[in-house]
Amino acid sequence: MSAVQPGCLWVVATPIGHRDDLSARAIATLREVAVIAAEDTRHSRPLLVHHNIDTPLIALHDYNERDAVDAIVRRMAAGDSVALISDAGTPLISDPGFRLVRAARAAGIRCIPVPGACAAIAALSVAGLPSDRFVFEGFLPAKAAARRSRLQELAGDARTVIFYESSHRVAESLADMRDIFGATREAVLARELTKMFETVLGEPLAELAARVAADPDQQRGECVLLVAGRGEEADAKLAEGQRIFAILREELPPAKAAKMAAAITGAPRKLLYEG
Ligand code: SAM
């Protein structure tokens, strides 16, 4: 008997690199649904062929999602089962699918997750950073000013922060993180997970930023960046930085006082004074 019930939306995670990271349940679901809505049908076809899945594909990407959603919801309402996949990992996680899931739920259609790979979670599972509380920030803004201002907002967060980053911006982003979170904050670069050149580097931000800037090989492939939250030690450092800043501020211009207080205590200058 088929495990796939008609008229449902199956949200199916696919591998982030290694083709065998597709669960047995995902394979069965993708074989049995009436149609697979894929972010890029050409990209997904080799994976499906590898697993002997010949279900028809339709496209659902950022550019047509608004228009395609109504037709897919109508199909499910008429009894067809549909699977949603993205190019890699879990749909909707920095990937299309949000509008479809929302519209399906609004139409009373059951949405069923078929969980599997997700780069953020895979990276967190090997980073060795606190994982009891974390925040997923997805991609940082591409423009430097917007990126820095997003990082400022996160600098005081006590939770581990997870970012997706494109390889050609990873060095720049690490330099900004070093300046804003502080040179000593622990960070991890998880690159090419589950693939041939899988690399996981964990160091304080100053060292990691310098190593990545100096090595073009570390600026290739797909990357997840993780930064430890502001810890108790950092809190104490910041409190001391604020105390010294307040004293120096009596005699010096604020930017100079902040620079000196940061040099003396190791507290991030930008958390002492936003100049
Ligand atoms: N939906 C996917 C997921 O569940 O992880 C994420 C899709 S998002 C468009 C692509 C980004 O995920 C990449 O730019 C990179 O930051 C991260 N990523 C995907 N695969 C990865 C891998 N094998 N190793 C490291 N990062 C990866």
Image (cartoon, rainbow, N blue to C red):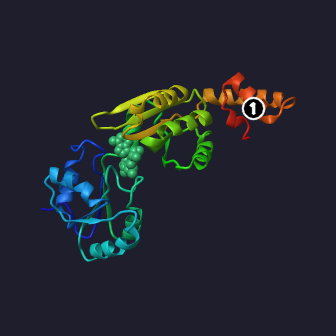
39 to the left or right of 250: left
Asked if residue 247 is positioned above or below residue 94 in the image, the reply reads above
Instruction: State the image coordinates of residue 19 (x, y, percent, origin top left).
Output: 22, 44
Foreground pick, 72 / 140: 140
The N terminus: image quadrant: bottom left
| Residue at left offset 34%, top offset 38% | 192
The C terminus: image quadrant: top right
| Residue at left offset 41%, top offset 32% | 216
| Residue at left offset 36%, top offset 75% | 70
Question: Is label 1 in a helix, a strand or a loop?
Answer: helix
Residue kind at label 1, given as amino acid type: Ala
Foreground pick, 225 / 32: 225
Total residue callouts = 1
Asked if residue 15 is positioned above or below residue 72 in the image, the reply reads above
Instruction: State the image coordinates of residue 141 (x, y, percent, origin top left).
Output: 53, 50
The 10 Å Cα crowd at callout 1, few under 14, some 14 to 19, many 20 or more, is many
Residue 84: tell me if it is visible: yes
Residue 108: tell me if it is visible: no
Instruction: State the image coordinates of residue 148 (x, y, percent, origin top left).
Output: 60, 44
163 to the left or right of 9: right
178 to the left or right of 218: right
Extreme top residue here? 264
| Residue at left offset 45%, top offset 36% | 131
Which residue carries the number 1 mark? 258
